[in-house]
Amino acid sequence: MMTRDKMITRLKGKISATRLTHSFGVEYTAACLAMVHGEDVEKARIAGLLHDCAKGLPTKTKLEKARKHGLPVSKYEEKNPDMLHAKLGAYYARYKYDVVDQVILDAITYHTTGRPNMTLMDKIIFVADYIEPNRKMLPEMEEIRKEAFTDLDACVIHILKNTLDYLNRTTAEMDYMTQKTYDFYVVHNMEL
């Protein structure tokens, strides 16, 4: 795997300065969450740093690249190619940043929608992307940030619920995986 400095140099040529600042925030937050929740801090840092490495691609190019590399494209992603940045990000992390650890690659793949039965690393990157210090203040952000360090599952549910509520209030279409993830965690949480 390439060094962090080389990753940053490459990222600077691929994403905007604002997106790079966000990526540094996710890297930092992911490392903090990993320390608190007993996950590998270095892996969390790498996943946080690289989670948006494909975000800078033009919308149309995301769909073209996903097809070119044989990545699965849902009907939702076909209509909303920007959502493919997560799958493409994992692909690029593997083939452009030399990341071979599947835990890191999966966390990058699912950082936007989540997935049922997420790994600890998946949850950390999903949450870190939402709460990092450079994010604009979204509804209930202070409470969500506290939950992130005390009850990660409750935090995941809270973020998913807020995301679904937002999508339902707007005309934005919803990715089925977000709803599927929410349903899984609500049922799972009720069983505990």
Image (cartoon, grey):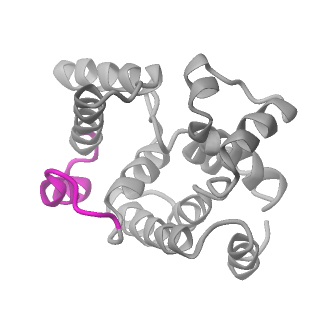
Q: Position of residue 114 (x, y in %)?
A: 44, 35
Q: Quadrant of the C terminus?
A: top left
State how many labels appear: 0
User: With respect to residue 163, does 78 lie above or below?
Assistant: above
Residue 147 forms part of the magenta stretch: yes
Q: Is residue 172 left or right of residue 158?
A: right
Q: Going 59% across and 25% down the picture, which residue do you hit? A: 79
Q: Position of residue 144 (x, y in %)?
A: 19, 53
Q: Nearer the viewer, residue 66 or 132?
A: 66
Q: Which residues are magenta?
A: 135-153
Q: Classify residue 158 by image quadrant.
A: top left
Of residues 163 and 143, which is closer to you in this image?
A: 163
In this rendering, position of residue 83 left or right of residue 15 = left
Q: Is residue 183 above or below residue 29?
A: above
Q: Residue at x 47, y 39 (%)?
A: 119
- Residue 180, percent across and down? 39, 19
Percent from the top left, x then y, of residue 17?
Answer: 57, 76
Residue occupying image coordinates x 36% and y 65%: 132
Residue 146 sits inside the magenta stretch: yes
Residue 72 lies in quadrant = top right
Q: Is residue 130 left or right of residue 125?
A: left
Name the image quarter holding the N terminus: bottom right
Q: Is residue 141 above or below residue 87?
A: below
Residue at the right extreme?
68
Between 100 and 93, the residue placed more toward the observer is 93
Residue at image coords 76%, 73%: 10
Magenta: main secondary structure: helix
